[in-house]
């Protein structure tokens, strides 16, 4: 009891009325107007909505992140393949490794595979048809990542 007024729990909504509001809540017609605060049910509903929205946004964020990594992978492969072709056209021989592209200033550095996070590219060596002397060199590059992308194609087949 505070100030001589007894706290009262209302029958509807489980709201707790105190002080001046306790007098107003004695009249059922004014109890809706005099009520302050939120019911337990309202709080649970709001928390449930927040949890559902958070779960949906986390899943959507993860999908966007995977899609972004796949886009970076495709662009890195396209760039390295273009640099292999340009190196072969300029030097009239295929590079022996991806490091040859870096040392000849065709690339600043060998990029890491965005899926694995490592510089673990799978290099396809083949016959050097560009060189007059023959031999072998890098003809293609692929990702070393296992699994499939969101489009259903294996990362190694990009």
Image (tube, helix red, strand yellow):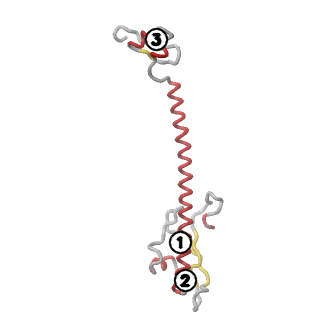
Q: Which corner quadrant holds the C terminus? A: bottom right
Q: Residue furthest left?
A: 3
Q: Which mark is residue 25?
A: 3
Above or below residue 152? Residue 108 is below
Q: CA distance from mark 1 to mark 2?
A: 14 Å
Disc on the earlier residue, 3 or 2: 3
Please, what secondary structure does the residue beneath circle 1 have?
helix
Q: Which mark is residue 79?
A: 1
Residue at the (53%, 37%) spot, across then down: 51
Please, what secondary structure does the residue beneath circle 2 have?
helix
- Bin the neighbour count of mark 3 within 10 Å (Cα to Cα): few under 14, some 14-19, many 20 and up: many
Q: Are marks 1 and 2 in contact (CB under 8 Å)?
A: no
Please, what secondary structure does the residue beneath circle 3 have?
helix
| Residue 26: image location, x then y, percent | 46, 8
- Bin the neighbour count of mark 1 within 10 Å (Cα to Cα): few under 14, some 14-19, many 20 and up: few
| Residue 89: image location, x then y, percent | 55, 84
Q: CA distance from mark 3 to mark 2?
A: 88 Å
Q: Nearer the viewer, residue 72 or 98?
A: 72
Residue at the (50%, 68%) spot, across then down: 119
Q: CA distance from mark 3 to mark 1?
A: 74 Å
- Bin the neighbour count of mark 2 within 10 Å (Cα to Cα): few under 14, some 14-19, many 20 and up: many
Q: Which corner quadrant holds the N terminus? A: top left
Above or below residue 73? Residue 43 is above
Q: Are marks 3 and 2 in contact (CB under 8 Å)?
A: no
Q: How many marks?
A: 3
Q: Residue furthest right?
A: 152
Disc on the earlier residue, 1 or 2: 1
| Residue 95: image location, x then y, percent | 53, 81
Q: Which residue bears the numbered disc 2?
A: 88
| Residue 120: image location, x then y, percent | 52, 69
Disc on the earlier residue, 3 or 1: 3
Residue at the (54%, 30%) spot, across then down: 45
């Amino acid at each position: 009891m505070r100030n001589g007024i007894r706290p009262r729990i209302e029958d509807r909504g489980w709201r707790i009325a105190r002080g001046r509001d306790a007098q107003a809540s004695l009249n059922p017609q004014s109890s809706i107007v005099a009520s302050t605060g939120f019911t337990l049910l309202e709080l649970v509903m709001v928390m449930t909505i927040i949890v559902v929205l958070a779960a949906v946004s986390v899943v959507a964020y993860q999908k966007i992140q995977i899609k972004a990594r796949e886009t970076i992978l495709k662009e890195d492969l396209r760039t390295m393949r273009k640099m292999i072709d340009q190196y072969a056209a300029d030097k009239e021989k295929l590079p022996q490794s991806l490091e040859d592209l870096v040392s000849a200033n065709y690339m600043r550095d060998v990029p890491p595979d965005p899926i694995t996070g490592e510089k673990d590219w799978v290099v396809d060596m083949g016959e050097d048809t560009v060189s007059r002397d023959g031999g072998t060199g890098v003809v293609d590059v692929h990702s070393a990542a296992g699994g499939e992308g969101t489009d259903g194609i294996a990362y190694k087949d990009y």
